Amino acid sequence: MTTSATVRHSIRLADGDAAYRVAAWREAMATSGEIQLTPEEAERFVSESALRRLGPVLVGRMSASDFRLVRTKAFAARSRLDHVFINVFEAG
């Protein structure tokens, strides 16, 4: 099994306007599905992620403000990648 260094990615309010931040998140998530945000969500959108490749698997921790990830059957067929998402909500 091969491993690689952890790749960190963040999108902060200081990084640019809403359109820039949403475009950056769409690019980061392009292989996972279509990103959708309301204008209000886009105005305050931020994210943090740390990803590591373990052999053929990409494992990581991602946190982001509100958005929707849409994966249609057609998108899944085109991507030819298997995805398993686990949502964990932390309170406190």
Image: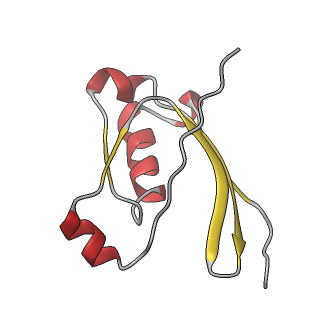
Q: Quadrant of residue 10?
A: top right
x, y (%) of residue 39? 28, 26
Left or right, residue 6 beside residue 28 = right
Q: Is residue 30 above or below residue 90?
A: below
**Residue at the outermost top position:** 92
Task: Name the quadrant of the C terminus.
Answer: top right
Identify the residue at horizontal 62%, vertical 73% (top origin). 57
Q: Is residue 92 above or below residue 28?
A: above
Left or right, residue 8 beside residue 20 = right
Q: Quadrant of residue 17?
A: top left
The answer to whether residue 21 of the structure is visible from this angle is: yes
x, y (%) of residue 80? 36, 79
Identify the residue at horizontal 19%, vertical 69% (top origin). 74
Q: How many marks?
A: 0
Q: Is residue 15 above or below residue 83?
A: above
Frontmost residue, 7 versus 32: 32
The answer to whether residue 10 of the structure is visible from this angle is: no
x, y (%) of residue 34? 30, 53
Left or right, residue 48 beside residue 65 = right
**Residue at the outermost left position:** 74
Q: Is residue 17 above or below residue 50?
A: above
Task: Name the quadrant of the N terminus.
Answer: bottom right
Visual colour scheme: secondary structure
Identify the residue at horizontal 39%, vertical 61% (top origin). 30
